[in-house]
Image (cartoon, rainbow, N blue to C red):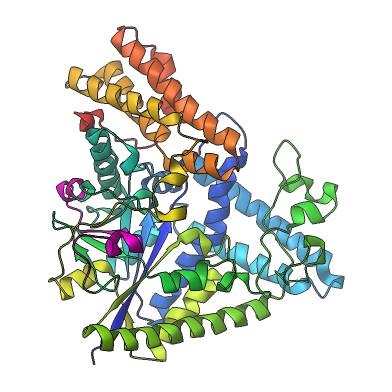
């Protein structure tokens, strides 16, 4: 029996490339370690349980090239494993400490189970969890898509060869990890400008995602709104976000993650317990920071010190309730849309993957309950990937999408404003110089080739949209500014050494060891 409509879940898993072998530990590397324990491993566990239990599920997931390179890096893998064992040690100590604190014991027990499950999965894949996601793709349950190489904001690059390089390098790196070329891409920040789709076509990309107004303001107007994909003039398909499902999850006021029974993100044992007790689990500088164990629930709009104890069973029950509510709303939505549109609609729900587990600790439970309910409790709506949709419904409207992004106000202001506009003249100049070098030295070997490849890495790392975003949001600004400045300086030094025929081999090798993203990069993509 054919369903009345389809649902496409797209999770965008991304972190900027942060790797600092020159330090024994580094604060910003915690972004990766927290996401592994709270998002990537829990989601992988949920998906594997679906397979074991015969639950049919489909979803699309970006694993950006910068994230994939970090997950595959032996240094970061070893550092994460050390951190994970430290968390297990602390969780076991907490079982003993909370034995006379019944209000906190359930949370302590939950954390012990959680971290030990993380360790089981981590060891199953010998520290390379990309293998786990690849296996899920190989059996047809998830569609892994790529992104611009370093999450570069293509619409703010004025050199087309630089845009092409971001796409080409990403596709090549994807093949290295997943054994085939990517069929879809997440444009960094969903930032689109007419013509970008032609560059995607050149690399064999079949589809990408857009914010809703990118389609709704397209030319001509979309016949089915955001509830069916469209073909760009190049033939590449664009899928756009359904805002109703976005608000149900994302909204700070009415979204599910704000429920009082869910775990409070901002209160952490790193600040709550005696200093000497938590000191072994802090960084080497000894400053109090979050250590990942949080014993309180959101409670409501009250001060942190008034938060009530977290009850994992209450939170899990609430996740099941919210999953049921979400599914009920999707059923009613597709029933209505199928009547109005006269066809089976496609509802596309797009979220940052890190929302599920890191920011919303119960997010993986929500996804678990949702797909199980979708599998067992109804036959109105069916999960589907973009490729499955295009194969089933190959005829779609052709239009030119509008310039857009999924950032605040819908365009490019988050990444181009008075807090960060000064970086672009340097990025543009470096991109022009990279193209110049690639054309001046189409053939090279030895230290010259190493220098040219490292110049490309430094440019790509400087182009990460994360740095401009952080400058706008006002968090970790000093680090974002330093990363942009350092990579531009590194690039400029390499450029001057190459042009002056005075390459410092030790300098290049030092940069290679620290900024080692894309080990198989070929600078000739800039020709």
Percent position (x, y) of residue 266?
69, 58
**Total labels drawn:** 0
Residue closest to the eye, 322 or 335: 335
Quadrant in which the C terminus appears? top left
| Residue 48 in view | no
Query: In the image, 471: left or right of 129?
Result: right
Residue closest to the eye, 192 or 188: 192
The correct choice, above or below, for 244 with respect to 85 in the image is below
Residue closest to the eye, 20 or 378: 378
Q: Does the magenta segment cover residue 217?
A: yes
Q: Residue at x 27, y 89 (%)?
A: 339
Q: Does the magenta segment cover residue 132?
A: no
Percent position (x, y) of residue 514?
47, 29
Q: Residue at x 40, y 48 (%)?
A: 68
Quadrant in which the N terminus appears? bottom left
Q: Which image quadrant is residue 103 in? A: bottom right
The correct choice, above or below, for 487 with respect to 391 in the image is above
Percent position (x, y) of residue 347?
33, 75
Q: Residue at x 60, y 40 (%)?
A: 476
Percent position (x, y) of residue 42?
52, 65
| Residue 160 in view | yes
Residue closest to the eye, 410 or 288: 410
Query: In the image, 267: left or right of 338?
Result: right
The correct choice, above or below, for 433 with respect to 190 in the image is above
Report the magenta residues as a range: 198-222
Query: In the image, 414: left or right of 338?
Result: right
The correct choice, above or below, for 23 with respect to 365 in the image is above
Q: Residue at x 44, y 57 (%)?
A: 125
């Amino acid at each position: 029996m054919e369903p009345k409509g389809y649902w496409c879940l797209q999770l965008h898993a991304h972190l900027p490339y942060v790797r600092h072998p020159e330090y024994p530990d580094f604060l910003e590397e915690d972004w990766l370690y927290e996401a592994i324990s709270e998002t990537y491993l829990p989601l992988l566990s949920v998906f594997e349980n679906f397979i074991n239990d015969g639950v049919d599920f489909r979803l699309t997931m970006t694993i950006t090239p910068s994230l994939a390179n970090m997950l595959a890096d032996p240094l970061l893998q070893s550092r994460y494993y050390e951190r994970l064992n430290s968390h297990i040690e602390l969780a076991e100590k907490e079982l003993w400490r909370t034995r006379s604190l019944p209000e906190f014991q359930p949370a302590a027990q939950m954390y012990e189970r959680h971290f030990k499950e993380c360790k089981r999965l981590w060891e199953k894949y010998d520290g390379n969890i990309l293998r786990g996601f690849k296996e899920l793709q190989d059996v047809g349950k998830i569609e892994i898509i790529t992104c611009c190489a370093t999450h570069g904001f293509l619409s703010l690059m004025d050199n087309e060869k630089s845009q092409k390089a971001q796409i080409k390098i990403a596709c090549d790196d994807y093949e290295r990890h997943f054994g085939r070329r990517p069929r879809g891409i997440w444009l960094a920040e969903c930032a689109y400008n007419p013509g970008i789709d032609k560059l995607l076509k050149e690399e064999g990309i079949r589809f990408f995602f857009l914010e809703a107004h990118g389609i709704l303001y397209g030319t001509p107007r979309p016949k089915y709104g955001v509830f069916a994909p469209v073909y760009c003039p190049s033939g590449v398909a664009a899928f756009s976000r359904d805002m109703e499902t976005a608000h149900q999850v994302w909204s700070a006021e009415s979204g599910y993650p704000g429920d009082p029974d869910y775990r409070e993100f901002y209160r952490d044992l790193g600040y709550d317990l005696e200093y000497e007790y938590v000191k072994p689990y802090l960084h080497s500088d000894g400053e109090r920071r979050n250590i990942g164990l949080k014993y309180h629930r959101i409670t409501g709009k009250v001060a942190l010190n008034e938060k009530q104890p977290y009850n994992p069973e209450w939170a899990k029950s609430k996740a099941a309730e919210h999953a049921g509510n979400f599914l009920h709303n999707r059923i009613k939505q597709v029933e209505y849309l199928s009547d109005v549109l006269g066809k089976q609609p496609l509802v596309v729900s797009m979220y940052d993957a890190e929302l599920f587990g890191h920011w919303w600790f119960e997010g993986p439970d929500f996804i678990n309950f949702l797909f199980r309910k979708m599998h067992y409790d109804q036959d109105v709506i069916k999960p589907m990937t973009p490729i499955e949709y295009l194969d089933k419904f190959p005829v779609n409207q052709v239009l030119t999408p509008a310039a857009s992004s999924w950032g605040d106000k819908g365009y490019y202001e988050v990444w181009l404003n008075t807090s960060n506009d000064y970086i672009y003249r340097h990025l543009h100049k470096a991109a022009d110089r990279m193209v110049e070098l690639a054309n001046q030295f189409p053939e090279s070997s030895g230290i010259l080739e190493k220098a040219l490849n490292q110049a490309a890495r430094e440019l790509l790392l400087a182009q990460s949209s994360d740095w401009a975003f952080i400058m706008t949001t006002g968090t970790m600004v000093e680090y974002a500014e330093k990363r942009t400045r350092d990579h531009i300086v590194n690039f400029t030094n390499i450029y001057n050494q190459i042009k002056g025929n005075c390459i410092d081999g030790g300098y290049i090798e030092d940069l290679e060891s620290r900024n080692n993203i894309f080990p198989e990069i070929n600078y000739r993509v800039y020709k």
